[in-house]
């Protein structure tokens, strides 16, 4: 238990395995399940918790059995994505606690009832009661979990300001170290990520998730619930942190595979979108085909169709996706529910571009009007940025187009969305080209540099082709190590020695997570795709050859 409190999951696992061998106790089984959960082996964690439940019940310890049943409800629902099993364990916990007057487990049952409910008003009512009980009993873990989830309920009910206040308060408590249980970090952060994905608030998602990472530093990632991994992966992807996004989405795919198609489809859609952004169209197409859930991958498929010169297919896929989204009922446990504002704005932007390619300017204008409406209701910029981009594409006057593109560029840049920013910069360059040739070339070169740093090969090639068509050299001289920070230069040198991330962390006296972050950053800055290419770059730089 001391190792668990310290977040030393490996030591905790070893200790609990030893205790289990000696005693076979329910406590050892439950503890081992917790340690395995934080080590990322969710299925093994569930198996041990199920055994702990059975041993506790046979021993007549109904409180311990109920605690395991409550744990299993949450984990089956949010980590495994099996809503049926989650509801079964919730019912079992309620039966085991029948006649109990212990307020704490009963309050946790009410919390589960709230997040299992498809009636948002009912969920909000239950969470209000749970927060009151938790505060009265001094259970900070329950209070923070319920507070964050009430934020989600309030946003669903239309009170976004109050919902954000709830989430911010809960995350402040989490970051301050109030929870006694690391699961509280997971639950509260998951609710926060869900809410931010719903309303397109990337800055809040980045702020709190980075802070949560610090809390969990060297203790494993807090996003162990598959749906929350998807949301976190999308934030990383949109932020240009593609190597980290790949890790997060791949972990989500491992958890969701073969368990719940709703989550698995969203994971595959995220991976397909990442591949599309990277210009790896064949891999994106294979992922979409593999998913077997065409609605959830429709936006990624629409982007791919547009890139492949099939605007009719792209527009039809967006329409199909929106029809399906409108038909989705509010679902519990954040599982397979309606997509957030970010994905919807992206989909509408794709449709505008597709309809313009089809010379259906009336339809494109109608779709752009939907983005304008969404922008008025959304204070976080994603809809406004796409709306300005759409208006720029539709503008018949060059000065109007430039003004719209500059507005879109400012909004995307303010949200720190590097790919979208670079794409709009290229659109701006094209609008400037007829009258301001040199300025257009400068803007296009800046876009090209951003695409190269990201590894967005298709966009980079398209931009270089545009520059050549203008009679302008596309790329500057090869990148210089001067772009790297001192720490990144150190990391590059250690990569060249063949060190792994944990070995780099040990050499530099930093955490493995920080080492991984530095590696990801320098790969992006050097415009290389993997460690091998970075090593080749370092070796060429040392020998004085071209990089």
Image (cartoon, helix red, strand yellow):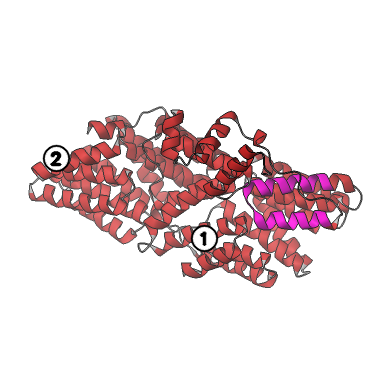
Asked if the residue under mark 1 is in contact with the one under mark 2, i.e. CB atoms within 8 Å, the reply is no
Q: Position of residue 486 (x, y in %)?
A: 59, 29
Q: Position of residue 39 (x, y in %)?
A: 32, 44
Label 1 neighbourhood size at 10 Å, few (<14), some (14-19), many (20+)? many
Q: Residue at x 40, y 42 (%)?
A: 221
Relative to 479, residue 326 above or below: below
Left or right, residue 329 beside residue 485: left
- Foreground residue, 385 or 325? 385
Spot the residue most to the right.
435
Instruction: Report the span colored magenta.
Output: 441-468
Sequence-earlier tag: 2 or 1: 2
Relative to 540, residue 251 above or below: below
Give the residue number, with chain letter if any, for mark 1. Answer: 269
Left or right, residue 480 beside residue 241: right
Label 1 SS: helix
Q: Residue at x 51, y 65 (%)?
A: 287
- Foreground residue, 66 or 455? 455
- Foreground residue, 230 or 536? 536
Q: Position of residue 330 (x, y in %)?
A: 45, 57
Label 2 SS: helix
Q: The C terminus lies in which quarter of the figure?
A: top right
Q: Which mark is residue 23?
A: none
Residue 100, quarter of picture: top left
Residue 253, quarter of picture: bottom left
Give the residue number, with chain letter if any, for mark 2. Answer: 19
Q: The N terminus lies in which quarter of the figure?
A: top left
Relative to 114, residue 203 above or below: above
């Amino acid at each position: 238990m001391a190792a668990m409190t310290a977040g030393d999951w490996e030591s905790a696992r070893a200790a609990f395995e030893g205790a289990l061998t000696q005693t076979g106790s329910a406590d050892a089984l439950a503890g081992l399940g917790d340690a395995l959960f934080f080590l990322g082996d969710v299925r093994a964690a569930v198996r041990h918790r199920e055994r702990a439940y059975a041993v506790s019940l046979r021993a007549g310890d109904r409180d311990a059995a109920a605690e395991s049943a409550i744990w299993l409800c949450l984990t089956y629902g949010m980590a495994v994505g099996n809503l049926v099993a989650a509801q079964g364990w919730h019912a079992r916990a309620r039966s085991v606690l029948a006649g109990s007057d212990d307020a704490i487990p009963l309050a946790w049952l009410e919390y589960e009832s709230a997040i299992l409910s498809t009636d948002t008003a009912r969920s909000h009512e239950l969470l209000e009661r749970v927060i009151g009980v938790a505060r009265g009993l001094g259970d900070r873990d329950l209070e923070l979990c319920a507070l964050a989830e009430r934020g989600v309920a309030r946003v669903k009910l239309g009170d976004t300001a109050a919902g954000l206040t709830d989430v911010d308060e809960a995350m402040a408590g989490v970051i301050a170290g109030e929870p006694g249980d690391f699961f509280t970090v997971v639950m509260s952060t998951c609710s926060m990520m869900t809410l931010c994905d719903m309303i397109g608030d990337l800055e809040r998602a980045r702020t709190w998730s980075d802070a949560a990472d610090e809390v969990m530093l060297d203790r494993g990632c807090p996003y162990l619930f598959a749906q929350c991994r998807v949301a976190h992966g999308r934030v990383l992807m949109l932020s240009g942190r593609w190597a980290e996004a790949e890790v997060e989405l791949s972990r989500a795919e491992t958890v969701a595979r073969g368990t719940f198609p709703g989550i698995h489809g969203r994971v595959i859609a995220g991976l397909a979108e990442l591949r599309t952004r990277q210009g790896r169209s064949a891999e994106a197409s294979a992922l979409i085909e593999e998913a077997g859930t065409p609605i959830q991958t429709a936006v990624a498929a629409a982007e791919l169709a547009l890139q492949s010169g099939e605007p009719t297919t792209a527009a039809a896929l967006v329409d199909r996706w929106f029809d399906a989204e409108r038909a989705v009922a509010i679902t519990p446990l954040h599982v397979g529910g309606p997509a957030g504002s970010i994905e919807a704005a992206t989909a509408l932007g794709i449709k505008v571009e597709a309809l313009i390619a089809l010379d259906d300017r009336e339809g494109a204008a109608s779709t752009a009007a939907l983005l304008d409406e969404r922008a008025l209701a959304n204070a976080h910029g994603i809809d406004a940025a796409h709306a300005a981009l759409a208006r720029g594409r539709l503008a018949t006057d060059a000065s109007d187009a430039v003004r719209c593109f500059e507005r879109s560029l400012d909004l995307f840049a303010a949200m720190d969305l590097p790919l979208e920013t670079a794409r709009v910069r290229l659109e701006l360059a094209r609008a400037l080209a007829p009258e301001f040739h040199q300025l257009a070339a400068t803007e296009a070169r800046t876009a090209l540099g951003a695409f190269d740093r990201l590894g967005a090969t298709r966009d980079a090639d398209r931009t270089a082709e545009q520059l050549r068509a203008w009679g302008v050299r596309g790329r500057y001289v090869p990148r210089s190590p001067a772009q790297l920070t001192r720490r990144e230069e150190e990391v590059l040198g250690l990569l060249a020695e063949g060190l792994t991330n944990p070995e780099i962390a040990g050499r530099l006296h930093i955490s493995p997570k920080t080492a991984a972050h530095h590696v990801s950053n320098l790969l992006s800055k050097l415009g290389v795709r993997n460690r091998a290419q970075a090593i080749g770059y370092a070796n060429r730089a040392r020998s004085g050859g071209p990089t």
